[in-house]
Image (spheres, rainbow, N blue to C red):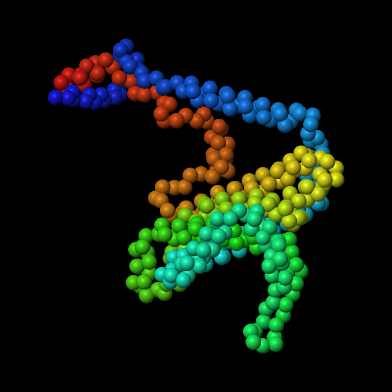
């Protein structure tokens, strides 16, 4: 027969009442401190490599950081990001609904769209739309079998900006359709049945019942897609769309300050992506309300305000607190009762 497990109750006696008290000592985590020291050393070496090296002219980085050309490129980068994301979200929702449709034609069209735009590199798509005039020299619109017809040269219509917006938007729509589809499918089918039971039409039920609940699963990856789209706008420099990276390249092609201008562009990308990450955090927090009975964790600003109010208390974890004191008599008594 196996041994009966011993359950030892914690003694509530004061520390000085029994000389044979046993105090639990927290475990020393030496590996964590070693890892932290090694990480700090590596980070310090990397920072020193970029800051101390004489091969980077940091005053030039500061002087070009807010020049007119760089700011114009930043403005176009933000515009391309917004336009591409709007196209991606709107078209992505439509493609997702088609993908979930019972109509085999709609499902097939949506699958082919996703297959093409997810399966080909974004750079190739940008170059394709920029050179679409080689396939369609002119673009027209009108009423078939009538004289009312308006046409224009494709090179005039599809500029570098238009080609970049189309490529970014369609590529983003393929990814957003999968995100929206996954978000809709995580909703309990009982929600749909309940909506139909009260007489709601499918379109109304999707808009007021399904989609608001799916937003909790859709928002986090959508924020990541937005940040990725912002960085992907740098790819349109291959068609000279005059966004941030193209402006930086135009400047360093004249003054040969290659690394300095690339650092200017990189810092601007970091600043904008940091703002987007900050906004994503609060949007996710907004849609997380009501998803659990527990209160939401405090925001960074709330944590900072609480620390100021408490006078910066020393943070200790529950697992690092000294354990309850046990006397030898309690241990012998527990073993005897178990036997």
Q: Return the residue nearer the eye: 84 or 111.
A: 111
Figure disc tally: 0
Relative image position of residue 47 (x, y in whole percent): 68, 30
**Where is residue 128 drawn, in percent x and y?**
67, 60
Q: Residue furthest right?
A: 254
Quarter of the rendering occupied by the N terminus: top left
Task: Say left or right for 13 vs 206.
Answer: left
Determine the image quadrant of residue 151.
bottom right
Q: Is residue 19 left or right of residue 259?
A: left
Q: Measuring 78% from the left and 34% from the top, which residue is drawn there?
A: 56
Residue 129 placement (x, y as % from top left): 67, 62
Outermost residue to the front: 135
Name the residue: 36% across, 24% down: 323
Asked whether, in this view, residue 283 is left or right of residue 259, the answer is left
The x, y position of residue 251, in whole percent, is 82, 47
Name the outermost residue toward the top. 19
In the image, is 6 to the left or to the right of 268?
A: left
The reply to whether residue 52 is visible in this rendering is yes
Would you say residue 74 is visible in this rendering?
Answer: no
At a point 72% along the width and 31% down the height, the residue shown is: 50
Depth check: give the residue in front, 199 or 89. Answer: 89
Q: Along the line of sight, which residue is nearer the eye, 175 or 66? A: 175
Quadrant of the rendering where the C terminus is positioned? top left
Picture quarter containing residue 252? top right
Outermost residue to the left:
1
């Amino acid at each position: 027969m196996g041994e009966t497990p011993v359950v030892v109750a914690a003694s509530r006696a004061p520390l000085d009442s029994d000389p044979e008290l046993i105090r639990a000592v927290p475990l020393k985590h030496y590996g964590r401190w070693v890892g932290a020291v090694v990480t700090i050393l590596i980070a310090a070496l990397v920072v020193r490599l970029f800051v101390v090296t004489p091969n980077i002219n940091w005053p030039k980085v500061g002087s070009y950081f807010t020049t007119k050309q760089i700011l114009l490129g930043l403005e176009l980068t933000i515009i391309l990001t917004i336009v591409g994301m709007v196209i991606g979200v709107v078209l992505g929702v439509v493609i997702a609904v088609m993908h979930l449709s019972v109509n085999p034609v709609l499902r097939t069209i949506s699958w082919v769209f996703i297959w093409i735009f997810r399966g080909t590199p974004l750079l190739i798509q940008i170059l394709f739309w920029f050179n679409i005039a080689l396939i369609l020299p002119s673009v027209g619109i009108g009423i078939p079998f009538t004289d009312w017809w308006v046409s224009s040269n494709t090179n005039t219509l599809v500029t570098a900006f238009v080609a970049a917006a189309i490529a970014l938007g369609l590529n983003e729509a393929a990814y957003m359709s999968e995100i929206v589809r996954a978000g809709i499918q995580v909703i309990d089918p009982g929600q749909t049945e309940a909506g139909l039971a009260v007489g709601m039409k499918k379109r109304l039920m999707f808009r007021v019942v399904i989609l608001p609940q799916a937003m909790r699963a859709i928002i986090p990856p959508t924020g990541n897609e937005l940040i990725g789209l912002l960085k992907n706008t740098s790819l349109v420099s291959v068609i000279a769309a005059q966004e941030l990276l193209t402006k930086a390249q135009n400047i360093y092609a004249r003054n040969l300050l290659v690394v300095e201008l690339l650092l200017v562009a990189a810092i601007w990308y970091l600043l904008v992506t940091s703002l987007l990450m900050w906004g994503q955090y609060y949007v996710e927090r907004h849609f997380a309300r009501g998803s659990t009975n527990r209160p939401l964790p405090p925001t960074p600003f709330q944590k900072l305000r609480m620390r100021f109010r408490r006078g910066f208390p020393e943070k200790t974890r529950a697992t690092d607190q000294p354990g309850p004191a046990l006397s030898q008599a309690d241990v012998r008594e527990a073993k005897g009762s178990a036997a």
